[in-house]
Image: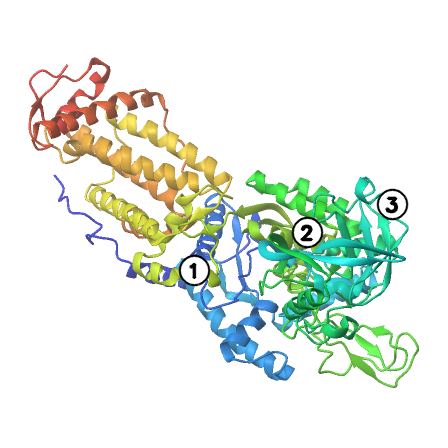
Amino acid sequence: MPDLQPAVKEMRWSLGKEEKLFRRWRREGVHSFHPPIKRKIFTIDTPPPYPSGRIWHIGAAAHYSEIDMVARTARMMGFEVYFPIGIDRNGLPVELYTERKFGVSIRDTPRERFVELCIHALDDLEAHLIGIMKAMGLSGDFDHHYRTDSREYRTLTQATFIELWHRGLIYEDKRPNNYCVDCGTTIADAEIDYRDLPTELVYVEFGMKGSSQKLTIATTRPELLCSCQAVIVNPGDERYKDLPGRSAVVPIYDREIPIMAHPYAKPEFGTGVVMVCSYGDYSDVQLFRELGLKEIVAVSVGGTMTEAAGLLSGLAVKEARSRMKEELGQRGLLAKVESITHRTPICERSETPIEIIPMAEFYLKQMDFLEKMREIAGGLKFHPEMHRQILLNWIDSISIDWPISRRRYYGTEIPVWYCGRCGSPNLPRPGRYYQPWRQPPPFRKCSGCGSEEGFIGETRTLDTWMDSAISPLFNSGYLRDDSTFKRLYPNTIRPQGKDIIRTWLYYTLLRCYQLTGKAPFESAWISGMGLDAQGRAMHRHLGNVIDPVPILEKYGADSFRFWAASEAAVGHDYRCSEDKVAAASRFVTKLWNVSRFISAFPQPRKARLTASDRWILAELSKLVKSCLEGYRGFDFFVPSNRTRDFLWNLFAPHYVELCKNRAYGKGVGREEQRAAWFTLHFCLKTILLLLAPVMPFVTEEVWSTLYSRRTIHTQLFPKAAWKTAYSRYTKDLTDFNSGVWNLKKSKGISLRAPLEVEVPASLAPFTKDLAAMHNIKGKRS
């Protein structure tokens, strides 16, 4: 009889082992990318997290832990995995955080100084995010992590701008654009959210030319009266059938404007009469174009009313709205005011209502590519399939080219200089990083007129999505390493959240197709949203953001990761709370305890199995099959929950108890004892392999202690190696065991106490193990 002392010495799992294991993996290059000739490469277009504030909330951390599960799953499927790590360090959120952190304003700070402050703020945030990634055990390439504000990355972004400019896909035009007065820049449609906000519907009395008649019009934007250029009524509205062709008089400003028939006017809203202003919303923009109206700019880029607003000039929009109501009331032109809820477009960054202001901006053509985008969207493999429709719906909603220039500081500069004589735009050759606002041009003559009199550098930057949308190109070596690019592009998978399908996913498809003629990846893996315990999205202003760092420190990475995997199926929203992570930690403890128990027994290479052994191995094969189906779809909900259910509800309470006496050699021969040892270890090895992508630390520790010096993370997934015929006994076995336990409990006796009970004939092959397990005396079957 061998000395049955557990090889797993510690009584409980130590969280301190996680950091030691992570350092060992880094030191030994366990997850390094070394593409051999015959092994297929699996490339992950990892989302570079956006450091917009100190706290990276628990849902974001869970998202990245699951991306790591994608990488670990691919390795265990036999792929060589390229898993880059980056930080997205451009754009508006960075600037807003810098303003908060240092108590400065971008409008009052010299550009060079503000850029320096952004870099300092970003370095702190980056260190914080990288620290969380490492604490969670991410197996990415931290030694070469990239930054979207690096000289190398911005050089590539500018090179793509120059290339698309020369192809005629980028142009400059003055058009009405979404404008955030708080952020001080144009924003794209994809950066707008819509909220139902309380507002007032103001009923204004317009005059009628040549008549004392009044025309009442309801509007939520009375401050825009100065820019009203037409009034419309629905052609089917019998109340106003005589009005088209006549003229109305704008109150306060006494201008005559035409009354027209147009189906946009809804008879059921307000009075059914609509004033068309430049610009209350995008319907106004469309109506101005369709009706050939001349715009009057009422709101400045500073968010104040222009001189065209007369008595409202210089007032902020909200103040102007209130002032106009007062003026209308004093003049007897205010019929009534109603409180309503109005669907309002807001900037997703500053969360303030947007204005629509005509401005000159650069545009990237996208309207010409929408059909191709639909084709590419239809050809991608989606995990889960249901989120394909979000992308298709967004593509179908696009109605204008993409405005790509921003009036901010911290971003990739637009590489353009304007001729001091003729004003023509001049672009440099690609291959260097250019800062036109602070550098002279790398050429002497204007490409348009040949003048050498001087140039004016462009001060605007590019939309941050122009940078992050080329992540598959940057990480594949585009324009820098042709051989690497051929190996890595298109990438295998793009993992991301569903909230940025309309931005990062769509813009990446557009940008990469325009540059390469190919889709940038084969699959899109879309995660759901991590919500708070009440089902609300986590936002700083709601005070419901959960910091993952204290939770990781308290429960460890494996508990956190197991919770993330087991909480919801891929693509579905889920609720976050510390209690859920605490519950997951109990499973880590269970796995450790079972492993420690099994570690006391020798590991036979083969054995003659009993019925009990064949039964649990049949169930194990079913488990393997189910888990591998989940892993193939990168749905970690399946293997995490199926394996937990197997270990907690079947293997530990039923099989381990069935074979425990045999394993200790009580009342059995050597052959039956070896069968128990073999089966226990076979099951544990399989469980560890199935859990390794989800729980990399505890599985590695047990594996390296018991089974191999070679890391578990270079192993392949197990196969369903056993026939499943013995699964037919599962219900009868578990029902019988539960019945005996309940009977002993009802009698108030110990589970180890002897009991006279009959083993049913259907379980005859298990009689010996059942009798030992339950201490059955007398008649058995």
For this orientation, the residue located farthest to the right is: 449
Which residue sits at x=89%, y=52%?
246
Amino acid type of disc 3?
Answer: Asp
Q: Secondary structure at mark 1?
A: loop
Mark 3: few, some, or many residues within 10 Å (few <14, many ≥20)?
Answer: few
* Residue 43 visible in this rendered orientation of the protein: no
Residue 329 shown left or right of residue 597 in the figure: right
Colouring rule applied to residues? rainbow
Contact check, label 3 and label 1, Cβ < 8 Å: no
Image position, residue 486 (x, y; %): 67, 54
Q: Nearer the viewer, residue 757 or 279?
A: 279
Q: Amino acid at mark 2?
A: Leu
Q: Are marks 3 and 2 in contact (CB under 8 Å)?
A: no
**Mark earlier in primary sequence (1, 2):** 2
Residue 545 tag number: 1
Residue at the front extreme of this rendering? 212
Q: Position of residue 377 (x, y in %)?
A: 67, 43
Report which residue position mark 2 lands on: 509
Horizontally, residue 618 falls left or right of residue 295, namely left
